[in-house]
Image (cartoon, rainbow, N blue to C red):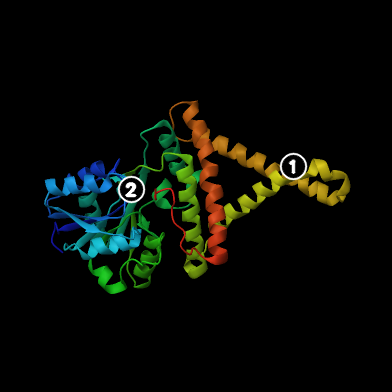
Amino acid sequence: MTEFPGVAYVMPVLNEAEYLEEAVSSILAQDYEGDKELVLALGPSTDNTNFVAQRLAAQDARITLVDNPQGRTPIALNLAIRNSTHPIVIRVDAHSELPAYYTKRGIATLNRVGAHDVGGLMDARGRTLLQRAIAAAYHSKFGFGGPAYHSGAPEGEAESAYLGIFRREVFEEVGYFDENMWRAQDWELCLRIRQAGHKVWFDPELKVGYYPRDNFPSLIKQSFASGTWRGEIARRFPEGKSLRHDLPPLLLVGVGAGIVSVIIQPVAANALPKPVNILMKLSQIVPVLYVSCCVFAGIRAKGNGMREKLLTAATFPAIHLPWAAGYMKGRAVGAGSTLDKGRVK
């Protein structure tokens, strides 16, 4: 591989009029001496996204537009990869902004460790008070737990990679993104890469600015879809099962049982056996303890002022509980056609 091989950036795009121009600018401004091309796979947006994309493409010949009428992320990625030419493929997102060093550092890491996919840290950010509070929850270990790309970890081999910097030949060897995996398609591809004997690598120096959902309804819908597809992974692949994924469903059951007990136990106490009354009273501790943990984690999270920190505390249930409900659905019946309805307008 040459020192500065050509790079193909591939981006699925759907309803991203507010974010697309800044994301594209961060890509084309990369401090990298090699050739660059950017392929935008345009879904059926209902805002001005396609107009913005057409204007950007008219201004810079390095931008190519391809149509993705179904609007599905894995289809968009495959279309973009197949319509690109350079030997390094970098997945990018319209909600993300790359630091200027990202490409050079990522390719250097790819070569240094002999990996076939390299990813970095999702550096969540916010433009509004609520979006900043949601971003703080992304950074908190209480928010997402294990994934290195959320809360950070030492450099090393990883199960999956955020976005991904790939050698093009890996797609010819293990195949492209699974178009039936409407979410979690990156995890499934990384599994095939690892099964082929190649490295997936996490480099914490690759910090990508990411703008999460900016309202609770969209965040809840996103969390439910993410949990559902994580349940599909656990259902389909032995490697996809983890004890930490079983904890949110247990939390959901505990919180739900506690709330039901608060309503029923005082009314039916005289009709219930003593052991049942004791169990119901104990279950009422769970939602109180969970809310206390959310408040404590919110206060400890990054943030400016108590209002922002309390909003972060309120974000945790909007992540945990819908994710848990989705995971239970995915494990029980599969993901089916579950969509992130917070993105589709």
In which image quadrant can residue 215 be found? top left
Q: Which mark is residue 125?
A: none
User: Residue drawn at (67%, 44%), measured in percent from left and top?
Assistant: 286
Name the residue carrying label 2.
46
Residue at the limit of the structure toward the front, as seen here: 46
74 vs 174: above or below: above
Are dots 1 and 2 in contact, CB under 8 Å? no
Task: Mark yes or no: residue 170 visible.
Answer: yes
Q: In front: 45, or 314?
A: 45
Query: Where is residue 111 shown, x and y percent of the image?
Result: 23, 60
Q: Reply above or below: 226 against 308.
A: below
Task: Indicate the secondary structure of the residue bearing disc 1.
Answer: helix
Separation of marks 1 and 2 at Cα, in angstroms: 43 Å
| Residue 101 visible in the picture | no
Q: Give the number of the mark in front: 1 or 2.
A: 2
Residue 20 locus on image (x, y percent): 26, 44
Q: Residue at x 59, y 39 (%)?
A: 293
Q: What amino acid is labelled 2 in the image?
A: Thr
Local crowd size for mark 1, using a 10 Å CA cut-off: few (<14), some (14–19), many (≥20): few
**Label 2 crowd (10 A; few <14 / some 14-19 / many >=20):** few
Residue hosting label 1: 263
Position in image of residue 241 (x %, y %): 52, 64
Q: How many marks?
A: 2
- In which image quadrant can residue 70 be found? bottom left
Whichever of labels 1 and 2 marks the residue nearer the N terminus, that label is: 2
Query: 64 or 106: nearer the eye?
Result: 64
Q: Is residue 212 above or below residue 238?
A: above
Q: Nearer the viewer, residue 24 or 123?
A: 24
Tell me the amino acid under the disc marked 1: Ile
Q: Nearer the viewer, residue 195 or 24?
A: 24
Q: Quadrant of the N terminus?
A: bottom left
